[in-house]
Amino acid sequence: MNALVRNTSSLIRTVAVIDVGTTSVRMAIAEIDSGSNVRILESLEQAVTLGNDTFTTGEIARSTIEECVAALKSYRRKLDEYKITQSEDIRVVATSAVREATNRITFVDRIFVATGLSVETLDAAEIHRITYRGVQPMLAAQPELFQALSFVTEIGGGNTELLLLKTGNVAYSYAFRLGSLRLLESMSKFNFARKKRQQIMTTEIRSQLEPLADLIRTSGPVNMVAMGGDIRFAVGQILKTHVGDDELVELSIEQLSEFTESILSETEDALVSKYQISYQEAETLGSALLINLIMAQLLEVPRILVSDVNLRDGLLRDMADGKDWSDEFQIQIIRSAWELARKYDVDEDHAQSVAQLSRQLFHQLQGEHELDKRYETLLYVAAILHETGAYISMSGVHKHSMYLIMNGNLFGLTSEDLRFVALVARYHRRAMPKPSHQAYGSMDRFQRVAVSKLASMLRLAIAMDASRTQRVKEIECVRSRGRIVISVPNVDDLSVEQIAMRRNRQFFESIFGVDVLLRTQIKELNVEPSAQL
């Protein structure tokens, strides 16, 4: 049965993902079966050096835009052959070269007019989320990685992406503004001799990757898992082997060092002739391998584990499982929040108590706030981090918390998500939101209301641990006579919490239009018919 027939089956879905990258535009066409298993049918790639424009002039030239249009038109014809026409079966994303271009809106609009394809510009956090989804199957197939500190890296044209995994969980994620093409463009301003240029590149790479040293504080084994076409090319040339699916190929640092030196000693023309690669690939090969090599040296690993996973794998996994946050992914986000909380010496017992109470309020007041499960995670993270600002000063702690969260490095949260969490934490005390507050005023109405709903619930949760003894563990919320009554079993004296609740409940009452009472138990309440929350 061919792909065209498969696409009509209710059991098998044929989809495509397109990655508009710094140096090329790549497409993967795949089948997704009823069990969410993904099988690649075809992969295509066309060189379009968007990064040459963005990293030199700051915008994408019209001629380059038209090159990209031509590439995507050819992909559109291929999609028509597979009868992939529904928008939900096609995902087109762009990375740093488009994200950083001053005319990125013009670019995505031109692509849409010419091809009908909608280009989604990914920020670093979204790339890390998708990359993690792509590497999950590989991690499951390599259990030894769970026993060590593993750095998963990919050297792109614009950025170097890093995920730090501890026992299979994301402990840290970061995007270094250090890519093979960006590095070359910075060197092109100077007329250095080849050997001198390599020395300067080495110094620049080490300077950019300096934060890696702070991440390695372990006496156990450390792994470096490298993704990307350049490092896979090195494996093919050195070991004469292919990196397969869900497979890791070991490449020693000595072998990589020797090969990198040989590549950097050759001209682009010589590399094109010797290895039968494109000029664009030859241009960035040496710098990409040098970044991989220096990263491995800084991590002090004896060898690199090379993977075939790429961004398109994560995009396909997204399409197979749905873009909603899975339970596993939400766990990773929360783990990252705790890492940030510990960095700023947050009172963990209090933060944990407030987070758990916030979660209970979210569940039991679902009929009031009507927000989906994704917002539960955002509220939970805000609850964990609402007092991070105390690290700077107790005076204005809410504003300092907002700043630290917005500038924090939380895995899995986009810049919009971070702003949302930061605002919920910012309004955990003091003044209520105002249009004059820039970050809040620039949101659309739905997001502004969602911030207010969650921040008001966070205030209630904080009031219930006002004593900081964590004695309030379980609550029950009931609507009675136009009021929300929160009852706490197994606690006789709530006087401290009730005083705090009277101070903190006004925000909630103004948003939801109901009074709030906190009681040790509920006595003879006339519960409204649909009130059990």
Image: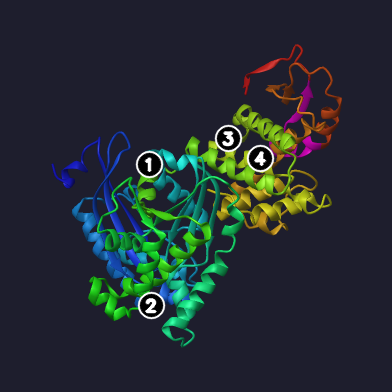
Q: Which mark is residue 370?
A: 3
Task: Judge from the rendering whether residue 204 lies leftward or rightward of residue 62; answer left or right.
Answer: right
- Over which residues does the magenta segment extend? 504-519
Judged by depth in the image, the label closer to the viewer, 3 or 4, is 4
Q: CA distance from mark 2 to mark 1?
A: 40 Å
Asked if the residues shown at circle 2 and circle 1 are in contact, with their CB atoms under 8 angstroms apart, the answer is no
Asked if the residues shown at circle 4 and circle 2 are in contact, with their CB atoms under 8 angstroms apart, the answer is no
- Type of amino acid under label 2: Arg
The answer to which of marks 1 and 4 sits earlier in the sequence is 1
Local secondary structure at mark 3: loop
Q: CA distance from mark 3 to mark 4?
A: 11 Å
Judged by depth in the image, the label closer to the viewer, 3 or 1, is 1
Residue at figure coordinates x 69%, y 59% from the top left: 438
Q: How many marks?
A: 4
Local secondary structure at mark 1: helix
Task: Judge from the rendering whether residue 388 lies leftward or rightward of residue 76; answer left or right.
Answer: right
Whether 518 is among the magenta residues is yes
Judged by depth in the image, the label closer to the viewer, 2 or 1, is 1
Q: Label 4: how many residues lie within 10 Å, few (<14), some (14-19) or many (20+)?
A: many
Whether 236 is among the magenta residues is no
Instruction: Tell me if I can see residue 156 in this picture.
Output: yes
- Type of amino acid under label 1: Pro
Q: Is residue 156 above or below residue 148?
A: below
Q: Is residue 8 above or below residue 532?
A: below
Q: CA distance from mark 3 to mark 1?
A: 34 Å
State the image coordinates of residue 131 (x, y, percent, origin top left).
Answer: 43, 51
- Type of amino acid under label 3: Glu
Residue bearing the label numbered 4: 454
Residue bearing the label numbered 2: 62
